[in-house]
Image: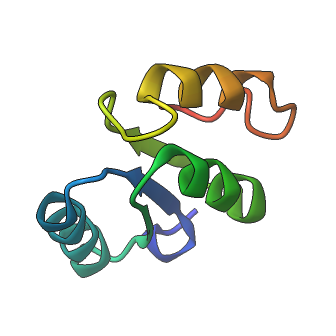
Amino acid sequence: MEKGDIKILVIEDEDDIRALMLHNLRKDGYVALGAADGEQGLRLAAENHPHLVVLDLMLPGIDGMAVCRKLRKTPDLRTTPV
């Protein structure tokens, strides 16, 4: 698998941090998706089936631990590295 085929989802509520992470991942050739909260992150994960999720623990609404638990309960995402 080539970098351009690898999808990485970044769930981070701090706009500057998320933008910097997405910029660097894309610059390095990855497909990078960003979410500003846990709900949006779960939706993007279900729609895009990322190969890796970079997850902030302190998120508004659904916190990172709850997002991780929900990902683990989703059959298509249960083995996705977080």
Residue 19, given in percent of the width and then of the height, sits at 21, 71
In the displayed structure, 64 sits above or below 55; it is above
| In the displayed structure image, the side of residue 5 where residue 74 appears, left or right | right
- Front residue (pair 63, 29): 63
Residue situated in front as seen by the camera: 59 or 24: 59
Count of marks overlaid on the render: 0
| 64 lies left or right of 49 | left
Residue plotted at (53% across, 32% down): 81
Report x, y in % for residue 52: 50, 45
Residue ID at (48%, 76%)? 4
Viewer-side residue, 82 vs 64: 64
Q: Position of residue 71 (x, y in %)?
A: 68, 31
- Say left or right for 42 vs 30: right
Q: Nearer the viewer, residue 60 or 65?
A: 60
| One can see residue 79 in this view | no
Q: Residue at x 43, y 29 (%)?
A: 64
The colour scheme used here is rainbow
Vertical arrangement, residue 37 with respect to residue 22, above or below = above
Name of the residue lying farthest toward the right: 75
Q: Is residue 1 above or below residue 78?
A: below
Residue sitting farthest toward the front? 61
Q: Quadrant of the N terminus?
A: bottom right
Residue 46 in sight in this render = yes
Q: Left or right? Give the position of 12 relative to 78.
A: left
